[in-house]
Amino acid sequence: MDSSTPTSPSKFTASASSPDHKAGFQVPIHSLALRFLICLGWFFGAMKAKTYAADGLSPISAAGIAEIYSRAENGSAADQYVLGTMFTTGVGLKMNPVEGMRWFYKAAEQGDALAQHMLGLIYDTGKVVQKNDLEAVKWYSKAAEQGCAAAMNYLALHYENGEGIEKNGLFALQLFKKAADQGDANALYNLALKYLNGTGVPMDKNEGLKCMAMSANGGQAQAQCELGLVLISGRSDSSPQGYNLLRKPAEGYKWLLLSAQQGNADARKSITIVKDKWVDADQQAEGLRLAREFEQFFKKNQAATEYARRKAQ
């Protein structure tokens, strides 16, 4: 993937004169409500990671949560962000999204990139306050300037669709690539669609599949569903440009299970279609084993990564 630096005067705010190379690209997860639900899954994962003790796996006690509150009151931006997630999700504290937003503001004003990203998401979805694309772009931009890949992805969607900012498909593509290079699962999925459809980039099914697989491994539910179907069928589609693959039914079934577990309706429907006809009983059992194995690894890795990030602050 190309990690070229955006060419606009401001690092993450494209100039009005920049050309728009958008060619009808539509992000399937266009609904802001769906975007919120996807991010909420990450949100809960991050919160669980942040309430883990020194080993990154054992839950913190109530006294530990009280210490987080104390540090936040004393100005710790990292702990202010944690409180924001706790109040917003109701994990560890009684749910109070307005109070959560207040803590996000405290952390964001101190330059915490994750808090800035979450403020962008709050304004983007309109779940806590009235939807405001201008404010969403403002906070996404601040977070993106600090290297927050998740913010880059959502900022790219705004440029892609002209929400709160002038449309600029070329700049959106640069942001998608930059976020994908950091491993952001949503950006990798959006980039996969571009390569698979030849939208804004030359069509490249192999690169598209590579991005889709990386996105699936990062936990993106729709990518998991689509990758699962490809591995079960052995083809991307029926077009001449579609790639032929060695069928891996058990591996494909694994991805469908993981996607369905996240609530993906397409995956749930696909499971009922492929069972027995495309994936036999032994392959289903192996797929279930692989899914459980992946889930355990993913959760441990997520917790350990978040703990390391907090220790570095």
Image (spheres, rainbow, N blue to C red):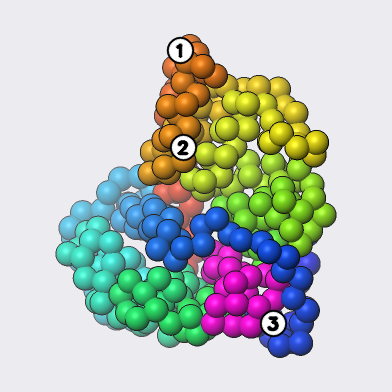
Residue segment shown in magenta: 150-173
Image point 35% across, 55% down: which residue? 44
Nearer to us of marks 3 and 2 is 2
Q: Earlier in the sequence, mark 3 or mark 2?
A: 3
State left or right for residue 30 relative to residue 261. right
Residue 206 higher or lower than 145, as above or below: above
In this orientation, does residue 67 appear? Answer: no
Asked where in the image residue 5 lies, by quadrant, the reply is bottom right
Element assignment for label 2: helix
Q: Residues within 10 Å of mark 2 (few under 14, many from 20)?
A: many
**What amino acid is labelled 2 in the image?**
Ala
Q: Identify which residue, 210 or 132, lies in the foreground.
A: 132
**Count of labels shown?**
3
Residue indicated by mark 2: 267
State left or right for residue 177 relative to residue 39. right
In the rendered image, residue 310, in percent from the top left (x then y), is placed at 44, 62
Indicate which disc residue 123 carries.
Answer: none
Image point 74% across, 76% down: which residue? 20
**What amino acid is labelled 1 in the image?**
Ala
- Between marks 3 and 2, how big is the CA–CA gap? 37 Å
Indicate which disc residue 281 carries.
Answer: 1
In the rendered image, residue 266, in percent from the top left (x then y), is placed at 46, 40
Q: Identify which residue, 96 or 170, lies in the foreground.
A: 170
Residue indicated by mark 3: 14
Element assignment for label 3: loop
**What amino acid is labelled 3 in the image?**
Ala
Q: Are marks 3 and 2 in contact (CB under 8 Å)?
A: no
